[in-house]
Image: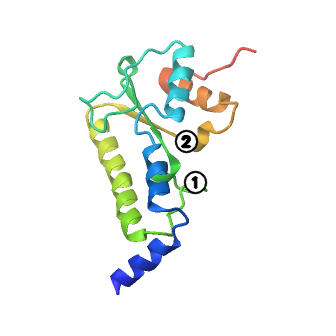
């Protein structure tokens, strides 16, 4: 019965295996557009950082050692941003996607806990927070968290 369901779910995919492979190959794990946007935003505000530190759990996207803070820039789909419209579970090949995405979410929690136990502050920036061309709200929030002071923008 499970093979029948899996076969039916594969039939529902609107792309051919070759097209799906091309799409998947274009998904970046590092240096994604959202990640670069956050890095540029921080650099412009004078913050200096390291990226993808392999010594830390989860290899955080951005490491601000001076502030003992790490930033993960998560894609809403891949990391299941709660309440986000981009975090829909695929309707095809559910037997493949559900465990894969659930494992991503579980791994995120494990890494965040391990970092907190080591005394790091963990910030997660979601892809959908960066879709707005005006990232002032996010920038203010990051500045407040990093510096501990309310951030005011100069016009």
Residue 57 point in image, percent of width and height: 27, 37
Q: Which residue is the extreme one toward the top?
A: 46
Residue 110 point in image, percent of width and height: 30, 47
Q: Colour scheme in the image?
A: rainbow
The residue at the point 33 percent across, 31 percent down is: 120
Residue 105 point in image, percent of width and height: 38, 53
Considering depth in this image, is 76 or 153 the residue closer to the camera? Answer: 76
Q: Are marks 1 and 2 in contact (CB under 8 Å)?
A: yes
- Secondary structure type for disc 2: helix
The residue at the point 36 percent across, 33 percent down is: 60
The residue at the point 40 percent across, 57 percent down is: 101
The span from disc 1 to disc 2 (Cα, nearest Å) is: 9 Å
Badge 2 crowding class, 10 Å Cα cut-off, few under 14, some 14 to 19, many 20 or more, is some
Quarter holding residue 97: bottom left
Task: Find disc 1 in the rendering and name its residue.
Answer: 86
- Secondary structure type for disc 1: loop
In the rendered view, tell whether residue 121 sits above or below residue 43. below
Residue 127's label in the rendered image is 2
Residue 130 point in image, percent of width and height: 60, 36
- Name the quarter where the N terminus is drawn: bottom left
In the rendered view, tell whether residue 95 sits above or below residue 86. below
Sequence order check: which comes first, mark 1 or mark 2?
A: 1
**Image position of 41 (left or right of 108):** right
């Amino acid at each position: 019965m499970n093979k029948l369901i899996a076969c039916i779910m594969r039939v529902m995919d609107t792309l051919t295996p070759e097209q799906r492979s091309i799409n998947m190959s274009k998904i970046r794990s590092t240096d994604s557009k959202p990640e670069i946007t956050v890095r540029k935003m921080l650099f412009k505000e004078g913050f200096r950082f390291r990226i993808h530190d392999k010594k830390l759990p989860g290899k955080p996207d951005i490491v601000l050692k001076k502030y003992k803070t790490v930033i993960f820039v998560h894609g809403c789909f891949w990391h299941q941003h709660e309440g986000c419209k981009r975090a829909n579970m695929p309707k095809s090949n559910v037997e493949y996607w559900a465990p894969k995405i659930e494992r991503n979410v579980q791994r995120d929690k494990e890494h965040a806990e391990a970092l907190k136990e080591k005394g790091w502050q963990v910030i997660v920036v979601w892809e959908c927070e960066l879709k707005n061309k005006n990232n002032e709200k996010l920038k203010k929030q990051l500045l407040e968290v990093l510096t501990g002071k309310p951030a005011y923008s100069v016009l």
